[in-house]
Image: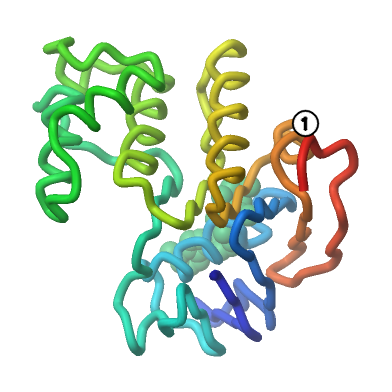
Amino acid sequence: MIEVKDVSLTLSKRQILDHVSLQVGQGEAVGLVGGNGSGKTMLMKCICGFQTAFTGEIEVFGEKIGKEAEFPKSTGFIIETPGFMPYMSGYENLKVLADIHKKIGKEEIFAYMRLVGLDPKDRKKVRKYSLGMRQRLGIAQALMEEPEALILDEPFNGLDKGMAEKMRDVLLAEKKKGKAILLASHNEKDIEYICGRTYELDAGKVVSEREAKGTVTG
Ligand SMILES: Nc1ncnc2c1ncn2[C@@H]1O[C@H](COP(=O)(O)OP(=O)(O)OP(=O)(O)O)[C@@H](O)[C@H]1O
Ligand SMILES: [Mg+2]
């Protein structure tokens, strides 16, 4: 599914990623941990095709990113705080994005907005959304087209306790459906709950790979 092979990235003469290799298989949720600045977000940007200056190889569903495909196919993602059109409502934002692939329509958008606890009929503009509401909209966007892989950078950012717990269960359900999930989080509990395996980055290097304890499945 997702295969990162010997990926290095140097920006402004600084080595950001240092020979990183990892895999995420079908139905597998893999955690990505490490301190601030260890390279988690940058690695995810490389996988999603937003950062192309890396060496090595990233393959998603059999396509080499930056070579055979600009962006990974069938991959939903949240990287840092999701950006939306501020003067549109949540629904309008998702509709614009859904219209790019034309895979889903109003019904699916409504369903995913409700899943994350947003009212699809709320006319409120996204610029008036709270951090948590924005994050919820980001999760709905990442999931709504039922992608086969999910790249999630701190997806629980700004969510209240109840919603974070609900989202953990949503992600577990996605994993059980056979999706490949790569999840970066500073919250060990979230990682333990969802991920069967975890890679730790330090200064752009994978310093450990371990089985997470106490995983519910996998
Ligand atoms: N556009 C950029 N140009 C140059 N260096 C960058 C750029 N963006 C990030 N970096 C550097 O890359 C390194 C890795 O950053 P990254 O955002 O991947 O860390 P992270 O593990 O996601 O940290 P956090 O836990 O704080 O989110 C940091 O040293 C950061 O300063
Ligand atoms: Mg980060």
Left or right placement of residue 27 versus residue 99 in this view? right
Left or right placement of residue 139 versus residue 195 in this view? left
Q: At 43% across and 20% down in the image, what residue appears?
A: 132
What is the tally of numbered marks visible in this picture?
Answer: 1
Ligand 1 within 8 angstroms of badge 1 C-beta: no
Left or right placement of residue 96 versus residue 209 in this view? left
Question: Residue 17, position in %: x, y?
Answer: 63, 74
Callout 1 environment at 10 Å: few (<14), some (14 to 19), or many (20+)? few
Question: Residue 215, position in %: x, y?
Answer: 81, 39
Report the amino acid beneath label 1: Lys
**Location of residue 123 by image quarter:** top left
Question: Residue 216, position in %: x, y?
Answer: 79, 35
Q: At 73% across and 50% down in the image, what residue appears?
A: 35
Q: Nearer the viewer, residue 65 or 42?
A: 65
Q: Disc 1 marks which residue? A: 189
Q: Where 195 falls versus 58 (above or below)?
A: above
Q: Where 135 falls versus 69 (above or below)?
A: above
Question: Residue 1, position in %: x, y?
Answer: 54, 70
